Image (tube, rainbow, N blue to C red):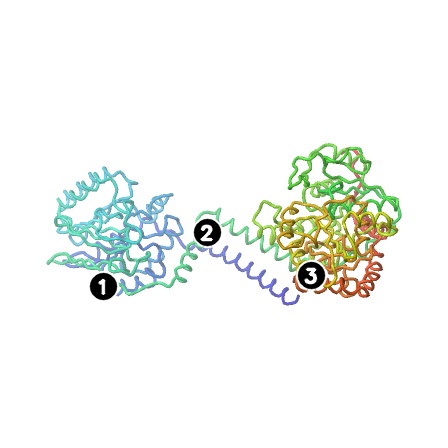
Amino acid sequence: MRRSGWALKLLFTVCLATLAGLLGYRVYLNVFDDSLHFAHTEQVAAIESRLADRQAYTFAVVGNINNSVGIFQRQMVPMLNDAGVDFVVSAGNAVRSNGEAKYRALRGALRKLEVPYLLTFGEHESGAFGNYRFYEHFGPYFYSFEAGGDLFLFLDSTGYTSLAWQLRWLERELDASEAEHAFAFLGHPPLQINQELLFGGDDGDYLGRPGFRDQLTELLQRHGVDAVFSANLPVFARQEHEGTTFVTTGGAGGLVLNTDASYYHYVRVSVSPEGVAIEPVPLDIGQHPVLAALEGFWLTFHSFVYVGYRNFFLLLSALGVVAIWLYRVIFHERDYYPDFSVDPTPYRGEPLRVAMFTNNYLPFVGGVPISIDRLRRGLRRLGHSVRIVAPRYEEGTDHEPEVIRAPSLLAFGQRREFRLAHLLALRIRRGVRAFRPQVIHVHHPFWLGSLGLWLARRWRLPLVYTYHTRLEHYAHYVPLPGPLFRNLISHALVRRFANRCDAVIVPTQSAEDYLRIVGVTTPIFVQPTGIDYARFHGVNAEAVERLRAELGLGGERVLISVSRLTREKNLDFLIDAVYRLAQRCEQPFRVLIVGDGPERERLQGRIDALGLSEQVTLIGTVAPETVPLYYTLSDAFVFASKSETQGMVLLEAMAARLPVVAVRSSGVDDVVRDGVDGFKTPESPQTWAQRAAEIVDDDARRQEMAHAAEARARGFDLEPVAREVAEVYAYVRAARAQEPSTELARGD
């Protein structure tokens, strides 16, 4: 715990430092890192000054810088500074995209050049307001100037500027110029290169509109332009066409293939009285993939911090939420023990009105409905009143005095056994309000359970939740990806719901451990579900013998299991284990599986396939009053489910003097005492069969365990359990009494 607290404090400090750093960086970007407007004005002036009265000079052309920090800024810029060139020209795609952060990052890289620079307006510089940023930072999209007696022409090949207008402008510039040499720069290559590329090279990478392209190339060649430089492709390509050299260069930082045509390079252009020399300068450089990924991360981070206040405040808000949460986790005092200052004494003994909300109830047969019905009967014996809000079933009736039936919106399941109640039905609210409950008790963390939560909040009543079901084992019923529901949603749902209640009842200690692990901080009370102990004694012997005859039972040992035939009950394992028991057991035996469900047909097919038809019988659904007869004629109870929080059928079987053989899991582990009143085995068919054989073959051991099982079950009778639950009600009422008035508003 101490180590965990230290880690949380460190994380909180890091989060605060990150917030401070972000704010400081934002201030730096907006106050100290001033924008450079119309940089080309100063750069052209610097070039003109450098080339004044010069007959020879050298410049470098680069293409596809793409904001590369690792290639261009760290490796190529120092080489250009040492190359003795007079200035540098980008032939296009100097930025990776057109965002403000990318322009800021490019400007930082260009500042490291010790010579003037100029940029061509390329494809990456345009679009999504990139054209405005280019204009703000550098200047017009197409322009020209003369320096050193030569003419330099920069064109917009993106289509943002009228192409026809540029042709008229270009012709006037060329007609008026008396320069000895002329060089043109445009982002898209006007001529198709004769090289196959792994990527790039489709029509979109070249200068569009064939009519404009033809007029442009004819105009440039007619006026004797020495060279045309373009980017947009990750290659070096040189073509001669009617006296004009067309150069494509794209190796200044973008992704290259490291082939004969695609490699990192810049183009060196030397101008002298003897003429113009153009040659590529290959660079033996590269960038590790990890560094490239970090470079992309930095640019993305820079974008979030700099571009627009929306992204910045979104990031700042997210970090603020984390900081606040960490503050609460670290510095907010918590006491996970019950509040011992709460005195429930004044609330004990008086009759209570308890409204219960459940997503399933009788006549639906299952562990939760039976548990609720038993609690209802136990509370009634103690003088309390109960109203149960549950879905309406076809077999149900609207005249049950203690049940408020909600109309069903939807019935699903193979036998339409699951009902989705109509939450907005007026009969629910009217019936509950007329009952005037003092406590609301919910049995599911969703649907009707959520309605119970809403009413408890609205009427300011204490709310108790019984955790019956391990939801993660029911992922196959939910229309979501299984791992998503099983590993995340189910636990989050239980945690969130339980923490909104006043108390949580769990049937076993292992269930409490689970809730604490997933983060439930609400007071938790361990209270096993009660059983009607007397119901399993004094069973009519003649009725048992008639049932034995109906089932065709003789002198064989009878193993019984009571379970719904569904996937979460792990019945495939039980059948496999019985198959191994049949191979090793000397004493004849029969296995009776009482219950029904959507898996019945498939399980019967598996039984037949393994040749167990004589040993295993699927009984189907039986009337509740006949269940004790089945227990009485049996010799042991077998169980394989791992989805139980307690497993009431285990206690019922033990009350009927049946030792248990079950797979070790939550619920089972808290009820069965291994080697005393039964066996708990790992999920191994061989081990399970070995333990079951001990009970089947050893009469003395079976009788000893039977007595221990009955003694164990005696302590779970209905009335003592109901009395303990009433104690929980008294506790939450006393705790609520310390808060503002909880009286149910009469006018609501």
Q: Residues within 10 Å of mark 1 (few under 14, many from 20)?
A: few
Specify the quadrant that holds the N terminus: bottom right
Residue 581: mark in rendering: 3
Q: Nearer the viewer, residue 64 or 359?
A: 359
Q: Amino acid at mark 1?
A: Gly
Select label 1 or label 2 by which is in front: 2
Q: Residues within 10 Å of mark 3 (few under 14, many from 20)?
A: many
Q: Quadrant of residue 685?
A: bottom right
Q: Amino acid at mark 2?
A: Phe
Q: Nearer the viewer, residue 73 or 646?
A: 646
Q: Residues within 10 Å of mark 2 (few under 14, many from 20)?
A: some
- Which secondary structure lies at badge 3? helix
Horizontal and vertical percent position of residue 331: 66, 59
Give above or below for 84 relative to 594: below
Q: Amino acid at mark 3?
A: Leu
Dot 1 or dot 2, earlier in sequence? 1
Residue where numbered disc 1 is placed? 84
